[in-house]
Image: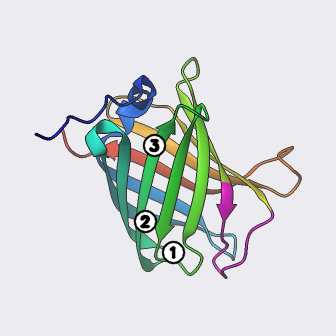
Amino acid sequence: MEQPLPEPPPEMAQLDWFLGRWDVLSKSKGQDGDWLEESMATEHSLILGGHAILEHFGGPMMGQPFEAWSLRKYNPAEVRWEQRWVDTTPGGFADWTGHWDDAARQFVGNPNRVLATDGTLTTDAIREVFFDIEDDRFSWKYETSANGGDNWSLSWSLEYQRSDG
């Protein structure tokens, strides 16, 4: 007889707000400095008996077809969230870690390794921040810093609106 999976760590509940289907308004800064607005969609679901979150993300990115998959999991041994991201851009792989701040209702992630679109490792400091989290919406921003995090520059933002009612 098959044994049931162990219970996931209680910290998995920190990202319950993330689960579901979302319509996403993407605003990304092009190389010319102009901002481009595009509509995307994403779905986040629990897998492995609630031990991980699978994300499927897609739509146009800078006017080109784009698709990405992500796997997030809370690692109790490291006391942090871990994420692996792959997408269809030439350098489309990232390895992230992050922390949930319950008081601020905010999630901040930092990459351990991010490839630039030309396939090289980037040297800028990078962070992702999920904020303004409500039941049917939340915001996300991707920021870079060329001076070790003293100043941050926004390069991509997403506005999520729940589409699964």
Dots 2, 1 in contact, CB < 8 A: yes
Q: Main secondary structure of the magenta part?
A: loop
Q: Classify residue 17 by image quadrant.
A: top left
Residue located beneath label 1 in the image: 62
Seen from the viewer's position, the closer of residues 82 and 161 is 82
Number of other residues with Cα within 10 Å of mark 2, as a class: few under 14, some 14 to 19, many 20 or more = some
For the residue labelled by badge 2, is the local secondary structure a helix, a strand or a loop? strand
Residue located beneath label 2 in the image: 38
* Magenta stretch encompasses residue 118: yes
Q: Is residue 115 above or below residue 19?
A: below
Residue name at image x 50 percent, y 32 percent: 132
Extent of the magenta region:
112-123
* Magenta stretch encompasses residue 121: yes
Seen from the viewer's position, the closer of residues 58 and 1 is 1
Q: How many marks?
A: 3
Seen from the viewer's position, the closer of residues 154 and 147 is 147
- Residue 107: x and y, percent? 56, 35
Distance of mark 1 from mark 3, alpha carbons? 29 Å
Q: Which mark is residue 73?
A: 3
Q: Amino acid at mark 1?
A: Met
Left or right: 139 as drawn, with respect to 45? right
For the residue labelled by badge 1, is the local secondary structure a helix, a strand or a loop? loop
Left or right: 131 as drawn, with respect to 143? left
Q: Classify residue 48 by image quadrant.
A: top left
- Residue 126: x and y, percent? 71, 54
Number of other residues with Cα within 10 Å of mark 1, as a class: few under 14, some 14 to 19, many 20 or more = some
Distance of mark 2 from mark 1, alpha carbons? 8 Å
Q: Is residue 13 above or below residue 108?
A: above
